[in-house]
Amino acid sequence: MPVVTLPFQELVDRFGPVPDGIELVVWDVEQPFDRPDDVAITFLPFYFAGRHRWQYVHDLPELELLQLPSAGYEWAVPHVPGHAVLANGRGIHDDETAELAVGLALTSLRDISAFQVDRTNGVWDSRETRSLADRRVTVVGYGAIGSAIATRFEAFNTTVTVVARTAREQDGRRVHAFAELPELARTTDVLVLITPLTDETEGMVDAALLAALPDGALVVNVSRGKVVDTDALVAELSTGRIAAALDVTDPEPLTPGHPLWTTPNTVLTPHVGGNTDLSVPRSLDLLRRQVAAYAEGRPFENVIEVPVSTR
């Protein structure tokens, strides 16, 4: 009987009716699966730390789908078995990550975290902060999450510009190419990063791009830490010229004593963009569709093209 493995019991308990002839089994990929010839679909755990565990995935000779819990997939591409397809979690975390991007921007601009420090110290200081409204926001990365982020920032009466690998018209918006980013940075008040990590985007936000941002600009990173040159960011933050609100860092987690723990004008969350009570129900929605597709012989959703050279 074909087996679909899920990483924890709650997913199995809440899955609902299963197509005839398919079995759901809990497997956290922490040890070899005891029936490797039966596994057709494996859903990796959230925050999967692969390392040697990838061998357990490669030991599944009938695996057809390796399903990721995240929209980002660069970390999994080199490890996909040649006989399986890879699908990402596009759609699971769109709303959650978009909410956090706006929340980080508001926390920084309105100085919310500093007011909470005042509260613990019994200080009542009704000082002026900066509004999000009327800011010029540039969103770098225009997939499903990038679109959700752009829509939410527009609701705050901002002027939103979107940037992606290739220029195009999409969703009634003009999408600018990455090559235009250095010029766009000069008129950007809030730079929001949600692009996938690739060879092209690694270190994209470097010293030159950061220097092009106006004084007082805010960098919001909800993509991957390596999209930003951390040393260059620390140098800019240390002067107080710009601010940052980061859900991801490089390295991650931050090591003890890392400068980002103490740089001024910095808001930091520990990679929680997709970690809310929506994660399980949204994951189940996608998993049910993938299992139905398998049972009915239809193509899977969210399939990522994995170059043969990486397998």
Image (cartoon, helix red, strand yellow):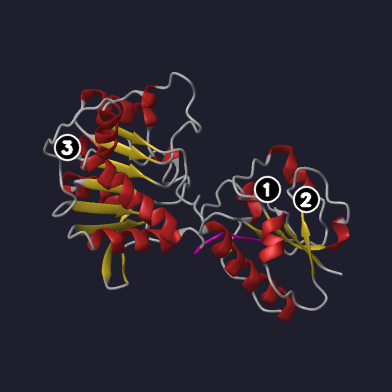
Mark 2 and mark 1 lie on one chain; the one further toward the N terminus is 2
Name the amino acid, label 3.
Answer: Gly
Q: Which amino acid does label 2 sit on?
A: His
Whether residues under marks 2 and 1 lie with C-beta atoms below 8 angstroms apart, the answer is yes
Q: Mark 1 points at which residue?
A: 79
Which residue is denoted by mark 2 in the rendering?
58
Q: Is mark 1 on a helix, strand or loop?
A: helix
Q: Where is residue 129 in the image (x, y as percent from the top left)?
A: 15, 40
Work out which residue is located at the far bottom of the displayed protein and give it: 296
Looking at the rendered structure, the secondary structure element under dot 3 is loop
Look at the image and say whether residue 171 sits in the magenta stretch.
no
Residue under the image location 37 percent in, 56 percent down = 98
Tell me if mark 1 has few (under 14), some (14-19) or many (20+) residues whose alpha carbon lies within 10 angstroms of its own. some
- Identified at 82% across, 68% down, the residue is 2
What span is colored magenta in the figure?
A: 85-91
Residue, x 21% and y 24% (percent of image)? 239
Q: Which of marks 1 and 3 is in front?
A: 3
Type of amino acid under label 1: His
Kindly identify which residue carries mark 3. Answer: 216
Gap in angstroms between the C-alphas marked 2 and 1: 8 Å
